[in-house]
Image (cartoon, helix red, strand yellow):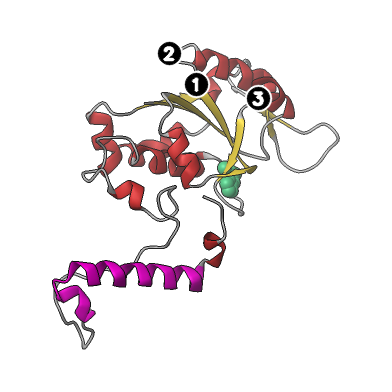
């Protein structure tokens, strides 16, 4: 799977791309991540301006259509496979586990990271990207949201996690809409806190029953909204 990141701050991704799970997935050739600095498409050297004030007034700056659209078109041509284009914005459709599962079966995803007040509307009208948000709060730019999406998607790719079943059992996936049950490891006792007896019983049926009761109870208490959500 190939990701193309279009951003004004490609260096933000440095640490993330060279750590742990993602670095391993890249080394194994399971995922390719290409970063593109939007400023390379700015016309006006040496300032390399990519943003301008909104017509009609108002705060902040908008990313210009005459920089963004040619940039995205050029990036698209850098590989044969057509990309699914996602523009990161708090106005977008909320990212969730079914969306991660859907992206994980795509061959190529382009993530457009906005900054400032966002993009000129014509970027959206011309490119018709999917607009995606990671939640109801405002970030300074799309980069952290893009990392969130990559993180959520890459761990679903076959061969990335050790245990193939585990990502389908995760909370919120299509195969499970309950929160996780509590888990324990050694020591058996710490500062007077023990481990539920059933987990030490060796009775696998009793353990499975206890775990599903715990999951259901926790979900009812914290996230009742998940229980009446259609699958
Ligand atoms: Cl995708 N971008 C920004 N700037 N803020 C957000 C977001 C995205 N998702 C939630 N807040």
Q: Position of residue 120 (x, y in %)?
A: 71, 29
Magenta-colored stretch includes residue 199: yes
Image quarter for ligand 1 equals: top right
Q: Earlier in the sequence, mark 3 or mark 2?
A: 2
Q: Earlier in the sequence, mark 1 or mark 3?
A: 1
Residue shown at 67%/18% (left/top)? 66
Q: Is residue 222 visible?
A: yes
Q: Quadrant of residue 118?
A: top right
In the picture, the disc for residue 83 is: 1
Q: Are marks 1 and 2 in contact (CB under 8 Å)?
A: yes
Q: Quadrant of residue 155?
A: top left
Say which residue label 3 marks. Answer: 128
Residue shown at 20%/73% (left/top)? 199
Badge nearest the viewer, 1 or 2: 1
Q: Tell whether circle 3 marks a residue whose Cβ is less than 8 angstroms from ligand 1.
A: no
Residue shown at 22%/46% (left/top)? 163
Q: Secondary structure at mark 2?
A: loop
Say which residue label 2 marks. Answer: 79
Magenta part of the protein: which range? 196-222
Q: In the rendered image of this protein, does residue 217 appear above or below residue 144?
A: below
Q: Secondary structure at mark 3?
A: loop
């Amino acid at each position: 799977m190939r990701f193309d990141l279009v951003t004004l701050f490609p260096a933000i991704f440095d640490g993330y791309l060279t750590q742990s799970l993602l670095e391993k997935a890249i080394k194994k050739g399971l995922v390719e991540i290409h970063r593109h600095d939007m400023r390379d498409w700015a016309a006006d050297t040496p300032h390399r301006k990519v943003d301008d004030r909104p017509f009609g007034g108002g705060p902040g700056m908008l990313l210009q259509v005459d920089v963004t659209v040619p940039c995205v078109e050029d990036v698209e041509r850098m590989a044969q496979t057509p990309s699914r284009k996602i523009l990161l914005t708090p106005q977008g459709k909320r990212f969730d586990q079914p969306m991660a599962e859907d992206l994980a079966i795509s061959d190529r995803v382009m993530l457009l990271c906005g900054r400032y007040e966002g993009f000129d509307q014509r970027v959206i009208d011309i490119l018709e990207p999917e607009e995606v948000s990671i939640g109801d709060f405002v970030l300074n730019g799309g980069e952290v949201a893009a990392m969130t999406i990559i993180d959520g998607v890459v761990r679903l790719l076959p061969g990335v996690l050790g245990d193939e079943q585990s990502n389908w059992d995760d909370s919120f996936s299509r195969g499970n809409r309950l929160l996780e049950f509590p888990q324990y490891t050694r020591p058996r006792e710490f500062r007077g806190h023990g481990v539920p007896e059933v987990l030490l019983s060796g009775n696998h049926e009793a353990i499975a029953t206890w775990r599903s009761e715990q999951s259901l109870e926790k979900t009812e208490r914290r996230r009742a909204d998940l229980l009446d959500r259609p699958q």
